[in-house]
Amino acid sequence: MKAVQIAASVLSCDFAHLAKELSRASDANLFHLDIMDGHYVPNLTFGQPLVAKIRQLTKLPLDAHLMVTNPEDYVAPFAHLGVNWFSFHQECVYHSHRVVQHIKSLGMKAGIALNPATPLSTLDSILPDLDYVLLMSVNPGFSGQEFIPSTLEKINQLKDIITQNALPTLIEVDGGINETNASLVIAAGADILVSASYIFSSKDYGAAIKSLRNN
């Protein structure tokens, strides 16, 4: 059984000490970048200058989650900055397949993110083209929210679809992940756990990451 990957979401780190924070969380497999525009979600986070700085400070893969109304405009710039994974919400684009192909053509892994109320059926025609699906286990916009329990059944259902169709698509889960629910999320079929406040509010980031991975 392949070990679960941990994506540490920098949204909850101390940006005044960015280099130190990234170093303390370097036991993660990925650094997750929550890109919010204040339109698609009710929050504004950070843009390309900070992504560029993060890229300079770590060799870990960067996993960008675009919560913006125009994700297609970010594909080429983020590839140029050295982002490795790129996911977007298909409600925000007219031609999801075109955006996915653009992402992949620039050497990034392509994913689609689904909000808690967005059904899996929206992936029916594009799932085989995706490297991963990002299932939101909170409503996107803010860190520190509680995990929505119904996400577990959604993970189960998606895992079944992927297995039945012999797809290599990974399942990433984001929102409210901690040591209490990580084992349930992994058992449901998740391959990647995104964690923000649980990691960056702990005293020992490495121990927090290990506790998620070893659940």
Image (tube, rainbow, N blue to C red):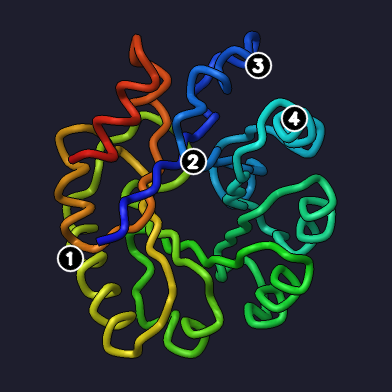
**Neighbourhood count class around disc 4 (C-alpha, 10 Å): few under 14, some 14–19, many 20 upward:** some
Q: Which quadrant of the view contains residue 205? A: top left
Q: Position of residue 53 (x, y in %)?
A: 77, 28
User: Whole-Å distance between the Cαs marked 4 and 2?
Assistant: 18 Å
Residue named by callout 3: 19
Helix, strand or loop under label 2 = loop
Residue named by callout 4: 50
User: Whole-Å distance between the Cαs marked 3 and 4?
Assistant: 12 Å
User: Whole-Å distance between the Cαs marked 2 and 3?
Assistant: 24 Å
* Relative vertical location of residue 65 with respect to residue 1 in this rendering, above or below: above
Quadrant for the N terminus in the image: bottom left
- 48 lies left or right of 144: right
- Quick one: which residue is furthest to the front in this view? 1
Q: Disc 2 vs disc 3: Cβ atoms closer than 8 Å? A: no
Label ID, residue 122: none
- 111 lies left or right of 47: left
Give the foreground label among 3 and 4: 3
Q: Residue at x 40, y 82 (%)?
A: 167
User: Whole-Å distance between the Cαs marked 1 and 2?
Assistant: 22 Å
Give the foreground label among 2 and 3: 3
- 174 lies left or right of 36: left
Tag 3 or tag 2, which sits nearer the N-term?
3
Residue named by callout 2: 141
Q: Residue at x 73, y 65 (%)?
A: 107
Q: Position of residue 168 (x, y in %)?
A: 43, 76
Q: Position of residue 178 (x, y in %)?
A: 25, 33
User: Whole-Å distance between the Cαs marked 1 and 3?
Assistant: 38 Å
Residue named by callout 1: 153
